[in-house]
Each structure stands twice: as C-alpha cells, then as structure tokens.
Image (cartoon, rainbow, N blue to C red):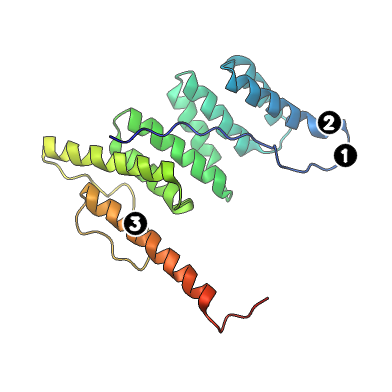
Amino acid sequence: MKKLGTIAMTLVLGGLVLPLAGCNVYRPHLLTIRANYNTSRGEYQPAIVDYLRARDGGHFERWLAYNLGNVYHFLGESNAALERWDFARDTDAAPLIYNASFNRGVYFLEQGRYREARNQFRTALEVEPASVDAKRNFELTLERLSAETDLTGDLPSEDSAEAPTGAVSPPESTGGSRMLDYMRRREDQRWRANQQMLADPDVEDW
C-alpha cells in the first residue's frame, strides 16, 4: 500500500516584491509569516487570527484562504477547510489550484470518498503532471476504488468528472490499472511532443 501524501503547506508571500508605499504595505506580509510560523508549531488559534488580519488588507485573499483551510483541517473543522480550499482554487494561479485540489483529495481519501478523491487528484495531475505525491495518491485512490468494486460489484462512476482532454483515447474500463495507464500514456505523449518541438529545425531560435 502506498503512503498517503501529507497535506501541503504553502508559505504565502515569501517571494513577492511589494511596492514601497509605506510601512502598512508590509503588515499583511509580516502577519502571514507569523501565521505560517505558528501553524508549523501547532499554535492554530493565533495563526487563524493573523491570517484573518492579513486578509483584511485586501491582498492575496485566495492564498490566505488556502492557508486558513490548512489550519481548519488540522483543527478537524472539515467543512470550513473544504470551503476555504474551494474558494482558493478559483484562480488562474497554477500552484494554488494544485495545492487546493491535492488537499481536497487527501481529505476525501481519508474519509473513504474515493470517487471525489480521484477527481481532485486528477485535477492536481492535470496542473502538475510530474507531481510524485499526486501520482501516488491517485494510484492509491484507484486501488481503493477497485477494491470497493470487488466488494460491491458496482463500477465506479465517471459522471462526476469528465476524462482529461488529449489525443490519447480514454480508457474503456474504469478499472484502477486502466485509468493509471491512461494517465501515464498522456504524460508520455506530452513529453514526446515537447521533445519534438525542441528538435524541430523549423522552430526559430530566439
């Protein structure tokens, strides 16, 4: 059995350059750093206070929501965590979409909600196909779904999420090995396409 991946923890704002408009600009940054530190120490209540105060500045709201979701998860407040992660991933920022989807997948996997976990890990893999943690958890989820099928005789439903787009035909079966093979073939196809572009002599060298 493959080990369940840990909940990701993003240190928000650490690499951002903020405009020099006065000391107040740095307040959300400093509050977030302190909140991240308190979270790493398991001091969740002061972390929540600092995340909320940082959010009041009107900057990086979805990143802060993601971190709040992590804290609520650690506190066992599942509904609040899922709500924050869902809000956080409504963005164009790929790292945020990946982490929020990954964390939702971990939660659903822990709860035995394998179809929902599968969909979340699939989204994470579409954003970051090379993620080892997402691949491992996706495979574990498919194994659990396969075992569930063996016990109940019911095939896992694909209605809740469309198959990822791409030139590779989707698997005819919903079995765990077929789906995992499908994801591997999609990644191999993407790698080959990138190699072909790099080797194409017609591509102008800028």
Front residue (pair 43, 201): 201
Alpha carbon of mark 1 to alpha carbon of mark 2: how far? 8 Å
1 and 2 marks in contact (CB < 8 Å): yes
Which x, y percent locates residue 82? 46, 31
Label 1 sits on what residue type? Ala
Judge whether residue 158 can be spotted in this image. yes
137 relative to 174, above or below? above
Mark nearer the N terminus (3 vs 1): 1
Name the residue beneath numbered marker 2. Answer: 24
> Residue 17 falls in which quadrant of the image?
top right
Residue at 58 percent across and 30 percent down: it is 67
Residue at 45 percent across and 39 percent down: it is 102
Q: Indicate the quadrant containing the N terminus: top left, top right, bottom left or bottom right.
A: top left
Label 2 sits on what residue type? Asn
Instruction: From the image, state whether disc 2 or disc 3 is nearer to you.
Output: 3
Mark nearer the N terminus (2 vs 3): 2
Residue at 43 percent across and 45 percent down: it is 132
Judge whether residue 90 can be spotted in this image. no
Name the residue beneath numbered marker 3. Answer: 184
How many marks do you count on the picture?
A: 3
Instruction: From the image, state whether disc 3 or disc 1 is nearer to you.
Output: 3
Which x, y percent locates residue 197? 51, 74
Alpha carbon of mark 2 to alpha carbon of mark 3: how far? 48 Å
Q: Secondary structure at mark 3?
A: helix
Alpha carbon of mark 3 to alpha carbon of mark 1: how far? 49 Å
